[in-house]
Image (cartoon, helix red, strand yellow):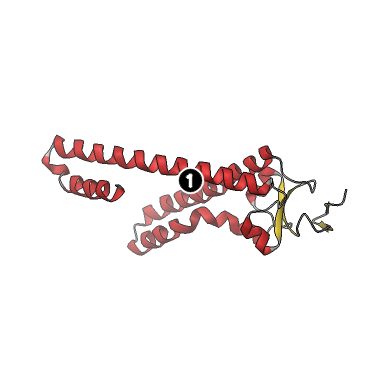
Amino acid sequence: GIGQIMVGIFEAAGRVGEGDAAVGMLVNMMTGAMGILSTYLLFILVIGVLYFTLFLTSSWQATPGRRMMGIMVITDRGTRLSYLGALFRYFSHLVNFLAGYIVLLLLMTVFSTVGSALVGFLVIIAAVGFPFYPYLLVAWMPEKTGLHDLIAGTRVVEGRPDVPFSFSRGGMQYSNQG
């Protein structure tokens, strides 16, 4: 499993100075780990696409968690998302992660010139949350939309599709009543 591969990687890393055999062992272990990781990521991607696309295009217009919170996802026009729209919204989340990582890389570049161990430690700690920081923009956006919502042309609103709603937010009128 992955644990055995990681042990092998650390063993090989400890023997790098012993010659080409250790380097070859390290490369083989890394290749195996990447194969397992890429299979896992593909599995997660497929499950994520199915989960979000099917729930957001369903009659709920929400995932189970959103439904329990009394919120749903609609288009800018106030209609239910199409399958293509839900898929586009799912992949637009990648922009948040990329934006977070770009900021992280810039900070790491700046702080690497400082050379402080404390600063380096703080950057590593911050790296865990950086991909999620762009989601904090929702708190300051006028319509409480995330970057992914702006890209996909969607809004998260309070309400349920089976209960009539009509409201205005940020100059836009939203309604599920014809």
Amino acid of disc 1? Ile
Name the residue: 56% across, 49% down. 96
In the image, 161: left or right of 33?
right
Q: Nearer the viewer, residue 1 or 102?
A: 1
Name the residue: 37% across, 57% down. 114
In the image, 9: left or right of 36?
left
Q: Nearer the viewer, residue 17 or 3?
A: 3
List x then y, in percent, for residue 157: 73, 57
Q: Nearer the viewer, residue 48 or 91?
A: 48
- Secondary structure at numbered mark 1: helix
Q: Nearer the viewer, residue 56 or 147?
A: 56
In the image, 66: left or right of 13?
right
How many residues crowd mark 1 within 10 Å: few (<14), some (14–19), many (20+)? few
Please, is residue 64 above or below residue 16 in the view? below
From this viewpoint, is residue 95 visible? no
From this viewpoint, is residue 112 visible? yes
Residue identified by numbered label 1 = 44
List x then y, in percent, for residue 162: 79, 56
